[in-house]
Image (spheres, grey):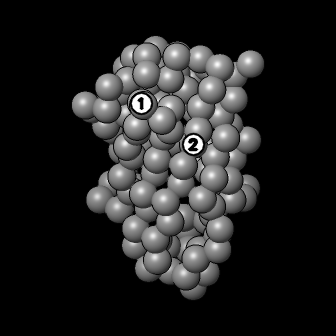
Amino acid sequence: QVQLVESGGGLVQAGGSLRLSCTASGFTFADSAMGWFRQAPGKERENIACITWNGRFTNYADSGQGRFTISRDNAKNTLYLQMDSLKPNDTAIYYCAARGFRYCSVHQADYKYWGQGTQVTVSS
């Protein structure tokens, strides 16, 4: 049974930092590109970042470029998202997703498995 479990969300003041984690099981994590997405209230879910199977290549959406860092530890089957300089408009539910393929994509439809999400709220 495939599971992706996000953690690390919460309430933070603007300018603060959070580190999200996503622990994977039930599939070969080390063979899959992984992505972080988010969905703000009233908006569509959007890609934030993606990392290839071996961690050598990453891709960021404009909204996270320079402030967010995606990383992974294949020995721990865990994906991370370090978020710095948070802004109120970063408030959203954050999801991790597994592509089931080695290379990145920004498209939701290309991801095979999804977590339940973790809430991030940034106060002004």
Residue that appears at 67% across and 41% down: 5
Q: Quadrant of the C terminus?
A: bottom right
Query: Which element type, helix, strand or loop, lies under badge 2?
Result: strand
Residue for point 54% across, 49% down: 21
64, above or below 115, in the image: below
Identify the residue under disc 1: 74
Q: Nearer the viewer, residue 123 or 25?
A: 25
- Examine the rendering and report whether any part of residue 50 can be seen: no
Considering depth in this image, is 19 or 42 the residue closer to the camera? 19
| Outermost residue to the left | 56
Q: Quadrant of the N terminus?
A: top right
Residue 62 spot, x, y in % from top left? 37, 51
Residue 108 located left or right of residue 101: right
Q: Which residue is mark 2?
A: 22
The image shows residue 64 at horizontal and vertical percentages of: 40, 55
Q: Secondary structure at mark 1?
A: loop
Q: Marks 2 and 1, Cα distance to the nearest angstrom?
A: 12 Å
Q: Residue at x 55, y 68 (%)?
A: 89
Residue type pointed to by label 1: Asn
Q: Earlier in the sequence, mark 2 or mark 1?
A: 2
Q: Give x and y (percent) for residue 116.
A: 73, 41
| Amino acid type at image mark 2 | Cys
